Image (cartoon, rainbow, N blue to C red):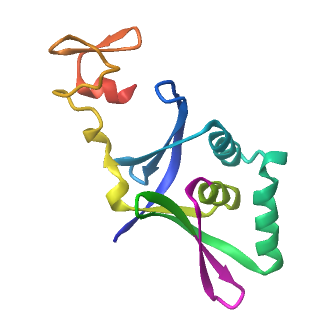
Amino acid sequence: MKKSKIYLHKIIHCSLNQKYKIIFNNSDYTKEFVAYFNNIYAKQIAMSSEGITNSDQSQYELFINLLNSLKMRVLRIVINKTGDNLIGTLELEDSKKNKIKINSYVADAIIIALITFSDMYIDESFLIKIDDLVDVENTPKYLPKKNENNYRSSNKMVNSKMEVLKM
């Protein structure tokens, strides 16, 4: 399985399911990975990406301090699938270059990667081409059809598939 490096791109509240949509892009912004998290994890991910710490992140700081005292560092995290669930694998290295892998909840792994400025990777099979996200023939229900060549997004009319992607 080939792994691709991903970067946090955007966090959006999804009113349909009351969760937060976290979007990650690959390095050339041609593919993306989308995950939905509750407000607690979305807040932690957002704060970690901005370098903000608070008391809610104490468990992550404690884990990182433990790694530092053991003279270990986070090399990268890899998002994998186990059965029907996504997991985050923390790849660690000690001072003697021994490597250790620890599985965790995917949001926790993302937060630790953001705090430690570690790289994030994902199996390429989870990435979706950005061009495939908007299909002209099968428009999503939240973009109601006005006529065959126009799409409505918010209160603005758009005339092409590319305009929808730019929003």
49 is higher (above) or lower (below) than 150: below
Q: Is residue 37 above or below residue 76?
A: above
**Image check: 66 left or right of 146?**
right
Task: Report x, y in % for residue 30.
Answer: 34, 47
Q: Main secondary structure of the magenta part?
A: strand
Query: Viewed as shown, does residue 104 lie left or right of 144?
Result: right
* Residue 131 image-quadrant placement: top left
**Residue name at image x 77 percent, y 81 percent:** 71
Residue at 65% x, 81% y is 93
**Residue 120 in sight here:** yes
Quadrant in which residue 65 is drawn:
bottom right
Quadrant that contains the N terminus: bottom left
* In magenta stretch: residue 141: no
Q: Quadrant of the C terminus?
A: top left
Question: Magenta segment range?
Answer: 90-107
Magenta highlight on residue 94 = yes
Of 81 and 54, nearer the camera is 81
For residue 130, above or below residue 91: above
Q: Tell me if 57 is positioned left or right of 9 in this view.
A: right
Q: Position of residue 135 (x, y in %)?
A: 22, 32
Q: Residue furthest bottom?
A: 96
The residue shown at (47%, 56%) is: 6
Q: Nearer the viewer, residue 156 or 64?
A: 64
User: Which residue is located at x 78 percent, y 58 percent?
Assistant: 59
